[in-house]
Image: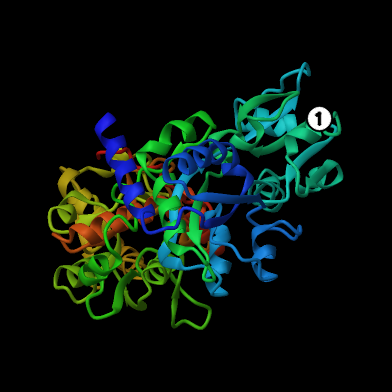
Amino acid sequence: MRSSRILALVAVALAASSVAAAEDIHVVVSGGFAAAYKTLAATFEARTHIHLVTEWGASMGQTTTAIPVRLDRGEALDVIILAREGLDPLFAKGQVDPASAVDLVRSKIAMAVRQGAPVPDISSVAAFKRTLLEAKSVAYSDSTSGVYLSGKLFKRLGIEQEMLAKGRMIPGTPVGETVARGEAEIGFQQYSELLPVAGIRIVGAIPEETQMVTVYAAAITSRAEAPAGARALIQFLSSPEAHEAITASGLEPVDQAGKPGSSSPAAVIQELAPSGLLRAAINLGNAVMAQRDEAGSAPKGVSVDLARELGRRLGVEVELVPFEAAGQAFEALKARQVDVAFLGIEPARAAEVDFSAPYVIIEATYMVRGDSPLKTLADVDQAGVRIAVGRGSAYDLYLTRTLRNATIVRAATGGGRAMIDLFLAGKLEAVAGVRQQLAAYASKDPGLRIMADHFMDVPQAVALPPGQRAASAYVRAFVEQMKASGFVAAALERSGQAGARVAPPAVPGR
């Protein structure tokens, strides 16, 4: 540990060596990272002799000090530190260098009450909802956490109208101060922003099922007057040397090993999109992950959004290559006809391609006729039972390994409607598939029934050809960022698939 810290400091010192001692680095920091930054800024200045001119501002919003507002009015800034989702509009405006962005920390939303007040129960979603309904007044920030609570969570909990009457968005000042003064019974903000406030008690992070983890990132502005110093600062803030102060402030440091940017972008692009065009295989056989748009041509959905975001971050054009079944997309990836594919993780596939950790988990189950004697999963695996599947799908591969007595009948053209037609036309006993897809068919036909249980979870991930070390590390980290930032959840919601589960964070080392 000591040697890694020494190396980190040496690297920062070398990066800073080209910066004049008297040069000022102008920084604006969002409140979520403020406590950690104050400690780290003092250390950085003492060790590099670079002077930091620091101001504070929200990641979004319309207050005069908000980071987007500062940039719009042309303030001369070198480094901004803000919630990761706040960067996208700044990239689009050309105000920030996309290649400079580095994720620093993860932060959770917490709830606080005034010191000495009764401590509400938020130990479960039901208890949390009850606490919200019983509270006389609720305060939340005008930045990332407050926008999420008022714009999404209250609606998802079914209490949007109730919260409108007693909820208050607090612009520009810490929510904890509002609670400490007794102006709100309960308040919500990033844990790290509540921690330094006197006169409150932090009840804890809100339940995981309702949580939104915010990733705070640092980036260099396009008009930076001291880019060398800016790079040195970001390198220090993202180094192992910074982890202790980050953790003490209530945040989780982002390990830069394997993060986008840890390998050179050129090395990643050379492996992942050597032609400068990222060809992404999209499996239309899984309607949870991708669907055709209303015009019936271009695909849309969470896998499409991820492909486009990956290309945007790498600065390469994306070509969507749609397939009607997962097996077809998998074969195209093996043949290097595409560069990346969005597929279910399955051992037979994992032996031939490299997978990221999953970003979404979906369930595979059976559909049968309403009068079928098949009631449980065990009932299906019997002699004489014929099961329609999409050829080459994850559940085809799984059932091929696990079924002992039933017979698998594969649709020649893969998944989707083809296997349903095979089931109906062949008068087979069951059809296997993704729960949401099967339920959509069953909702239109009262003569069909979906089994309550499921025979497997199908983790959806990004697949690459084997042996691409730089690209594989980049994509693994990219997927974790997309989950942590709420990008995946938002993409599911946009495509009408909010019932699917976002996969949990990957376990380091696995």
Neighbor class of circle 1 (other Cα within 10 Å; few <14, some 14-19, many 20+) is: some
In this rendering, position of residue 33 left or right of residue 97: right
Of the 4 image quadrants, the one containing the C terminus is top left
Picture coordinates of residue 171, whole percent (x, y): 77, 49
Would residue 484 be visible to someone looking at this image? yes
Residue drawn at 35 percent across, 38 percent down: 240
What residue would you read off at disc 1?
Answer: 185
Picture coordinates of residue 107, whole percent (x, y): 53, 40
Picture coordinates of residue 65, whole percent (x, y): 72, 56
Of the 4 image quadrants, the one containing the N terminus is top left
* Dot 1 amino acid type: Glu
Disc 1 element? loop
Q: Is residue 70 above or below residue 241?
A: below
Name the quadrant containing residue 340.
Answer: bottom left
In this rendering, position of residue 110 left or right of residue 296: right
Q: Is residue 352 above or below residue 154?
A: below
Observer-nearest of 361 and 175: 175
